[in-house]
Image (cartoon, rainbow, N blue to C red):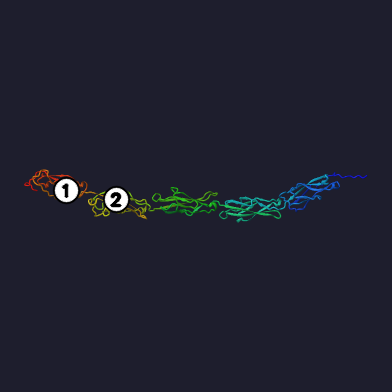
Amino acid sequence: MAVTVTPVNEVTPAITVPVGGYTATISEDTVVGTVIVTIVSTDADSGVHGDIRYSITGGNAQNHFSMEEYTGNVYVVAGLDREATDSYTLTVRATDSLPSLGDELYDETNVIIAITDVNDNYPTFVPSVYAIEVMESAAVGATLQRLTVTDDDIGVNENYDLVIISGNTNSDFALSGDDVLVAKNLDHEVNSYYDIVVEVADRGVPSLSSTARVIINVLSVNEYPPVFDVTSATVTIDEDIPVGILIYDANATDADANTAGVLKYAIESGDPEGFLFLMDTDTGKITLGSYLDYDTSPQSYTLNVSVQDNAGETGYLVDYMLLTIDLLDVNDNTPVFTQNTYSVDIDENIGDSALVVTVAANDDDSGLNAAILYSIDSGDGHEEFQIDTTSGDITTIVGQTLDRDTKDSYTLLVRAEDQGSPVRSSFCLVKISLNDINDNVPVFSPSDFDASLDENQAISTLLTSVYATDDDIGNNALLALSIDAASDPNSGHFSLTQISADTAEIYTTQVLDHENVNS
């Protein structure tokens, strides 16, 4: 009788693990397809139950590795990057039998793979451009900036050296490790800008390198004061120049550069109103801010003008100058008489060269603009009166006789004229009235009277009327008419009655007898 023994998968595959386990160290630039480790295992079963198949069951999420099913070879199937993953722990399995039989047995172990660095990353500045400001007074040896370099490699490949390759004029700066230092005394006025190129090179083989720009602006320290071109100046202007016109352009310089040399101008004092003169703070131009008047004090202004630079480490620096502004009088005022009309009474017998009246005018200008000359411009008394051109005294002209009875008043138009340019003048009226002097004898008209009367007329018979005149006026012309007793030898025959200022009537006071007195 024949008995057939059917094999049973009763022995589990056994992976032969070397001392220290399965490990491999490979370079990150290992070529795809390279076998890095071979797994060895045994199985005491025979036949299909002793056949072993290999697979990776864990740690290969990125599928960088694969395993030959029957040889146990683990090999690279994708490019590696140590900087992304520097080690892997793969779980590998040795499985016997066949899946279809349902009696598979397996053993597992780990394969540790270390990835070594290859110098495949450039050292890089972060950032690639540095902007630095430094005062020109910075001390030699002062640290200005620490440069930051990154390199994703490791070991010798990440070590690097820095060197300045261009832009370091006069070797004013230096490197100490990663630090940029001041190597020499700086001077903004000599060199205010540096565009330095720094190179970083790693120590890998071959060496990789990159560059960065270090831009350095040297700032000016306020070491020089501003200086006016002149310490004092004088300008002369007409009092009537228009508002807004340029009077003076103050100019100052500053040896500092950049912002420290930016200047600001100001009027510190000397403007009593605070707005007569305006200064442009940026340009130093001084313009007229309000109307001026020479005739109102003052006639001269002295401005204290300042110039100030921009603040630096030492603060503001200032300079001063004095600007004297002298006003010139312009003939802008007309002479003005103290009276519009002068009225005066004088005796008609005042005589030659006698003072009649003094006229006076004032002029608010000065110098020739205020020098007044007087003249009689017109009127009906220019042949009888004269005026002193400087004093304004009006006097009678020699040889001219005034007679109130001929002309009792005069009117003169007097001019006051200054000596400016253009000439300005004004006028006044002078009214001269003559006072009457009792220089006229009363006169009968007619001078002789003839009258006749029949004798034996009654008493109080009107004999005649008489009339007299006097060319004087006022009291001087009041008449008192009477009969001169000496002219009436037979006094008492007649009487006189004054019936008006210039008329009288003569009456008989007795009965006349031709045989006794016939005339």
Residue extending farthest to the right is 1
Q: Secondary structure at mark 2?
A: strand
The percent coordinates of residue 191 (x first, y second) are: 57, 55
146 vs 297, left or right, is right
Nearer to us: label 1 or label 2: 1
The percent coordinates of residue 27 (x first, y second) are: 74, 52
Looking at the rendered structure, the kind of residue marked 2 is Val
N-term-proximal mark, 1 vs 2: 2
150 vs 376, left or right, is right
Q: Secondary structure at mark 1?
A: strand
172 vs 154, left or right, is left
Looking at the rendered structure, the kind of residue marked 1 is Tyr
The residue identified by callout 2 is 430
Residue 309 is tagged as none
The residue identified by callout 1 is 467
Comparing 114 with 268, the one in front is: 114
- Count neighbours of disc 2 (C-alpha within 10 A) and say few if under 14, some if 14 to 19, many if 20 or more: many
Residue extending farthest to the left is 515
